[in-house]
Image: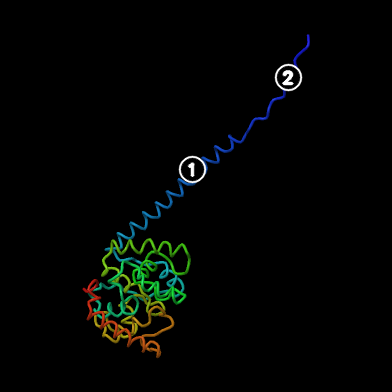
Amino acid sequence: MATTPKKPRKAKDTAPLLIAPVRSLRRKVLRWTLRGIAGVAAFFAVLVLLFSFLNPPTNIYQLQESARLGALQREWVAIEDMAPVMGRSAVAAEDANFCLHFGFDMNAIRAAVAQGGTRGASTISQQVVKNVFLWHGRSWLRKAMESVLTPAIELVWSKQRILEVYLNIAEFDEGVFGVQAAARHYFNVDARNLSALQAARLAAVLPDPKGRSASNPSNFVRNRTRSIISGAETIAADGRDSCFRP
């Protein structure tokens, strides 16, 4: 009796078996990526809320400088215990429209872009975000995070709080952070007793505290000091200090 030859078995198509695990892996990666982003966002949201009333203990740059120098000079002081002219001087030097914007000075940004750079476009609020929450250096990641966190602190913090934090974390000489330490370092006075000239000198060393001196000013610092004194007087006269006046 003749037997019917068996037909050769067709090779199984393994593509569907491979696609399913790949899709599952992609979903897991996406899920964990979104969870990671949400976790980072929640972490910074908590810090923004906490630092609206708690003083930041330190920051990345200060830790780096402390490791390099061995010790830092810094002492926190409330804005009520600073000479009012100090706040006006800092605003005149770094962000004259501080009370008029919501974290970004669009006029300054447009002017900086027209001049082919970004110098002078960073507001006090942006500098606070960089110094408190982020790190120094130029990168798209840092700028992206800064662009998100700046409106957040403007929304949660008062302008007075933003300026208070700024004046306590700004570097005024190598290893000297905050106006209280700077006032003692340069002039042997407390921040509350700074004169208009001394406050302007401190503001004049920003944003290059390692290259400028408030006690031994160069011609550039002297000229900048005069400009800051005039600017601080103007800010007081036209009411642009109303948002941070103690």
Q: Nearer the viewer, residue 109 or 230?
A: 109
The x and y percentages for residue 121 are 39, 73
When the figure is inspected, residue 221 is found, relative to residue 115, above or below; the finding is below
Residue 3, quarter of picture: top right
> Which residue appears at 39% of the width and 67% of the height?
130
Under circle 1, the secondary element is helix
Q: Nearer the viewer, residue 212 or 124?
A: 124
Residue 163, quarter of picture: bottom left
Instruction: Name the residue type under label 2.
Output: Lys
Seen in the image, is 127 located left or right of residue 238? right
The x and y percentages for residue 204 are 36, 83
First-in-chain label (2 vs 1): 2
Seen in the image, is 202 located left or right of residue 81? right
Q: Nearer the viewer, residue 24 or 205?
A: 24
Q: Give the image's coloring scheme.
A: rainbow
The x and y percentages for residue 181 are 33, 78
Instruction: Name the residue type under label 1.
Output: Arg
Query: Which is more foreground, mark 2 or mark 1?
Result: 2
Numbered circles on residues, count: 2
> Which residue appears at 27% of the width and 68% of the height?
161
Residue occupied by mark 1: 27
Q: Quadrant of the N terminus?
A: top right
What is the residue that sits farthest to the top in this orientation?
Answer: 1
Residue 6's disc number: 2
The x and y percentages for residue 134 are 41, 65
Residue neighbourhood size for the residue with mark 2, other residues' Cα within 10 Å, grouped as few (<14), some (14–19), many (≥20):
few
> Which residue appears at 45% of the width and 45% of the height?
31
Under circle 2, the secondary element is loop
